[in-house]
Amino acid sequence: MFRILQMHEQFGMTCHDVDFSAKEKEFRYTAMLEEIVEYRDADLPEDELDALVDLVVFALGTVERMGWADVYEEAFTRVMAANMQKQVGTNKKRGDFHIDLIKPDGWEAPDLKDLV
């Protein structure tokens, strides 16, 4: 997060400098989708990597712009702990790829309410 915050500070666009608007949310959504499409359409490994890095930059930048930089690590820890309770299987809503993670009976989603 430090490098994202550093970049936003350099350009005067931290969550403390500019309000996060519905228009920015739509812009960031569109930008992240663009990176996903670039990843899908990439023919070279370096282009795939570039698209994935850009996607993470936009995602983490959105976290910072929404004012959640200080709670991101805790949120990530909670989400990963919940993910580690899943099982390998096929998630039918994403097709038939067999190396996916599925929620077993009794699985509980991470609680992030206290972080936002």
Image: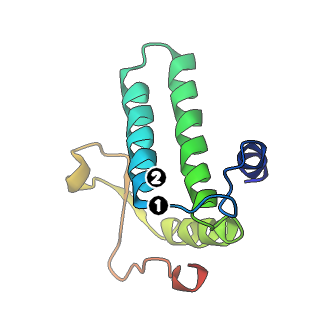
Residue at 21% x, 45% y: name it: 95
Which quadrant of the view contains residue 53?
A: top right
Label 1, secondary structure: give it. Answer: loop
Say which quarter of the image contains residue 76: bottom right
In the picture of the structure, the residue carrying the numbered disc 1 is: 21
Find the distance from the CA under tag 2 to the CA under tag 1. Answer: 5 Å
Residue at x-position 29% and y-position 42%: 97
The answer to whether 36 appears left or right of 52 in the picture is: left
Amino acid on which disc 1 is placed: Ser
Closer to the camera in the image, 70 or 52: 70
Q: Secondary structure at mark 2?
A: helix
Quadrant the N terminus occupies? bottom right
Q: Is residue 40 above or below residue 60?
A: above
- Image height of 3 relative to 80, above or below: above
As drawn, which residue projects farthest toward the bottom?
114
The residue that mark 2 highlights is 24
Please report the residue visible at 74 percent of the width from the left and 52 percent of the height from the top.
5
- Provide residue 68's location: percent of width, then percent of height: 63, 68
Q: Is residue 98 above or below residue 40?
A: below
- Is disc 2 surrounded by few (<14), some (14 to 19) or many (20+) residues within 10 Å? few
Where is 42 relative to 110, above or below?
Answer: above
Residue type at the position of mark 2: Glu
* Numbered label tally: 2
Q: Indicate the position of residue 91 as horizontal and vertical percent values.
A: 27, 55
Residue 7, numbered label: none
- Callout 2 touching callout 1 (CB < 8 Å): yes
| Quadrant (top left/top right/bottom left/bottom right) for the C terminus | bottom right
**Which residue is at a point 62% across and 58% down the rendered structure image?**
18
> Which of these two is toward me, 54 or 94?
54
Residue 32 point in image, percent of width and height: 44, 42
Q: Give percent across and percent down for residue 57.
A: 60, 42
